[in-house]
Amino acid sequence: MIRCFLVINNFGKPRLIKFYERLSNEERQKAIEDAYRLVSKRLDDLCNFVEDDNLFGGDSQLIYRHFATLYFIVICDKAESELGILDLIQVYVETLDKSFENVCELDIIFNQQKAGLILDQMITGGLVLETNSQEIEKRYKELEKSMKQQDREASNSPANMYKGASPRTF
């Protein structure tokens, strides 16, 4: 099971955080700091798998990829396939790349909701649901269309038709 998915820049600033376990804010902050500390000091030619008993206990592993200025980090059970998680990270980055047309750190900063919703299409409750980037993009576009439709319906509702109009007095 995936315990958390983190996107952290080269300076240790979290850009996207998704935890799939209940943790206090202090525990979350410690996990983010420990994860960044572990991956930032590693050389680029080293393996992308790290086992550290201090992260969520002894049965956890950290799997990461470093793209440009961002670390994409997944902390999960040792039962998860390392190559499967690397593929998951790759698919997420490819999907972001398609959605933002050459994704960069600023795209994630200014489009937190979109980046999070794309991740939610892939992982729910710590379980991987989808790894096909075309299917993920298709589902996101359907969700986006549905949200726009709801916004239009809400703005056309009778309660909103009289906003700005002077109140009637009887």
Image (cartoon, grey):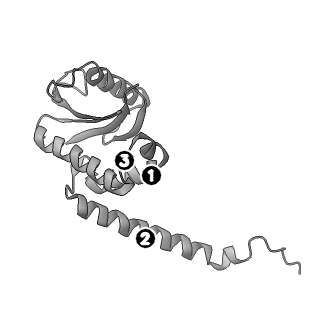
- First in residue order: circle 1 vs circle 3: 3
- First in residue order: circle 2 vs circle 1: 1
- Residue located beneath label 1 in the image: 113
Mark pair 1, 3: CA separation: 15 Å
Specify the amino acid type for callout 1: Gln
Decide: few, some or many residues near mark 3? Use Cα within 10 Å; few <14, some 14-19, many ≥20.
some
- Residue placed most toward the observer, 125 or 37: 37
Mark pair 2, 3: CA separation: 22 Å
Could you tell me which secondary element the residue under label 2 belongs to? Answer: helix
Position in image of residue 124 (x %, y %): 28, 52
Specify the amino acid type for callout 3: Val
Mark on residue 33? none
Tell whether 161 sits left or right of 68: right
Could you tell me which secondary element the residue under label 3 belongs to? Answer: loop
Mark on residue 103? 3
- First in residue order: circle 2 vs circle 3: 3
Residue 23 lies in quadrant: top left
- Residue placed most toward the observer, 143 or 92: 92
Decide: few, some or many residues near mark 1? Use Cα within 10 Å; few <14, some 14-19, many ≥20.
few
Res. 81 in view = no
Mark pair 2, 1: CA separation: 15 Å
Decide: few, some or many residues near mark 2? Use Cα within 10 Å; few <14, some 14-19, many ≥20.
few
Position in image of residue 50 (x %, y %): 17, 26
Res. 4 in view = yes
Tell me if residue 90 comes above or below residue 136 in the rendering.
above
- Residue located beneath label 2 in the image: 145
Specify the amino acid type for callout 2: Lys
Tell me if residue 3 comes above or below residue 125 in the rendering.
above
Position in image of residue 143 (x %, y %): 39, 66
Could you tell me which secondary element the residue under label 1 belongs to? Answer: helix
